[in-house]
Amino acid sequence: MGLSLCNDPVLMGDRSARFVLTCLCSTLLALLLSAHTGWASTPVAWHLSAVRAPDAWPVATGAGVTVAVIDSGVDADHPALDGSVLPGRSYVDVDPGAEPRLLAFGSDPGPVYERAFGQADPVGHGTAVAGLIAGSAESRYPGVAPDAEILPVRVLDDENRYHDSAMVGAAVEWAVDNGADIVNLSLGGHYDSPAFAEAIAYAEQHDVLIVACTGNQREEAPAEDVWFPARVSEVLAVTGADEHGDRWRTAVTGEETDLAAPGANLYAPKPGGGYKSVTGTSFASAVVSGAAALVRSAHPEWSADQVRRALTETAVAGAPGLGEGIVDAAAAVEAEVLPRVAEPAEAGISPVLSAAATAAGGGLIGVSALLLRGGRGARRGGRLPGRPRTMAG
């Protein structure tokens, strides 16, 4: 069963005056800052103003923070990402037969593996996500955290598809073991996966923040549930908003939604150079991952939980369906968040481990789309026979 994607520029009716005012004020302030700091030589993109990223840049730019982009790979040669993309890894079978094989290249030294796998993107989804997170400050469209580093982990094939949810979990664990401070998952689906949930628990145990999109659906379809893994409580679940501060009409939301971010009509890098317009909760997730990188850069001593709380507790409340509200990167950077007081150990297991144990078998996992409708999917824990695999487009 394919997943619907955000690709139609339809505006929603209600307006959030506070959000619009924030955008206008942030744009003016960013232009003033650019005259003194050189951060922006051209007007700031609307989504950067909306989340007040330029206001945070004098304090934090993402330096020292690594964001894993588990996606379709990243074009390391794009001028906006040159020097920001680390050697990555790929779990894509380059020679699929009747039975898929797990391949994991890219971690070995040498330009062939680096370019052919983690640091290349035949599809464009991962490059767009990476650019929204960490595009260079000197580029036409800077990322939210322009000095963060990207760790690319490819799980999507040349058609932007994957069969196996357990493979995505393996990619998460590899990213955690190889220096990720934040993991961006601009993918998801309708079915739970125990193996994928175990990987999320592994990231939590190692103080790595997981950010994931809530999903996209067809405008005319009944409301869908928040996708897995975003619906896991330990994951920071992000839905998409438009320029007016309303939920984008095809962005999935629900009680598990934590935050919102701009997710419609954004400009992001495309493989081979240049930019394209993208829409979907995939890209809202990227914006929040960038904001998280700013917070971790400003407060390297903070835990992932403190970063998460800084983002949710300072969000700009507004229209329905946006969780705690639209992320405010500058306010989150300036926040004071104390560590949680340790509670006495209780019998049993953590909620995320419980989810891993009780999940109803790994199904097809979908990736939120760029501009075309379709579905997406990936990892080792069981495929649902008779159902078409999902894809990202």
Image: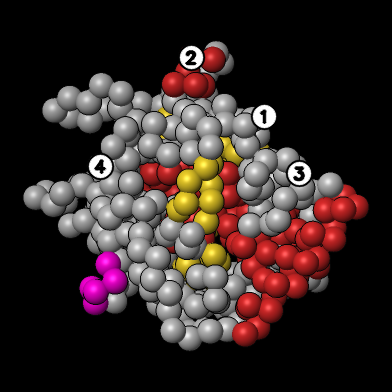
Look at label 2 and name its amino acid.
Answer: Val
| Residue nearest the viewer, comparing 359 with 56 | 56
Label 1 or label 4, whichever comes before in sequence order: 1
Q: Quadrant of the N terminus?
A: bottom left
Give the class, few, some or many, for how many residues have Cα within 10 Å of label 1's Cα (few <14, many ≥20): some
In screen coordinates, is 236 left or right of 169? right
Label 4 or label 2, whichever comes before in sequence order: 2
| Residue nearest the viewer, comparing 314 with 370 | 370
Label 2 or label 1, whichever comes before in sequence order: 1
Give the class, few, some or many, for how many residues have Cα within 10 Å of label 2's Cα (few <14, many ≥20): few
Q: What element carries label 2?
A: helix
Residue that protrudes farthest toward the front in the picture = 42
Q: In whole angstroms, how far apart are the C-alphas of marks 1 and 3?
A: 13 Å
The residue indicated by pointer 3 is 63
Residue 347 x %, y %? 49, 70
- Residue at 48%, 67% in the rendered image: 240
Label 3 or label 4, whichever comes before in sequence order: 3
The circle drawn on residue 83 is 1
Residue span colored magenta: 218-222
In screen coordinates, is 198 left or right of 194? right
Establish if 112 lies above or below 360: above
Residue 152 x %, y %? 52, 36
Closer to the eye: label 4 or 2:
2
Q: Is mark 4 on a helix, strand or loop?
A: loop
Look at label 1 and name its amino acid.
Answer: Gly
Give the class, few, some or many, for how many residues have Cα within 10 Å of label 3's Cα (few <14, many ≥20): some
Label 3 or label 2, whichever comes before in sequence order: 3
Residue 266 x %, y %? 52, 56
- Residue at 63%, 57% in the rendered image: 45
Disc 3 vs disc 4: Cβ atoms closer than 8 Å? no
Q: Is mark 3 on a helix, strand or loop?
A: loop
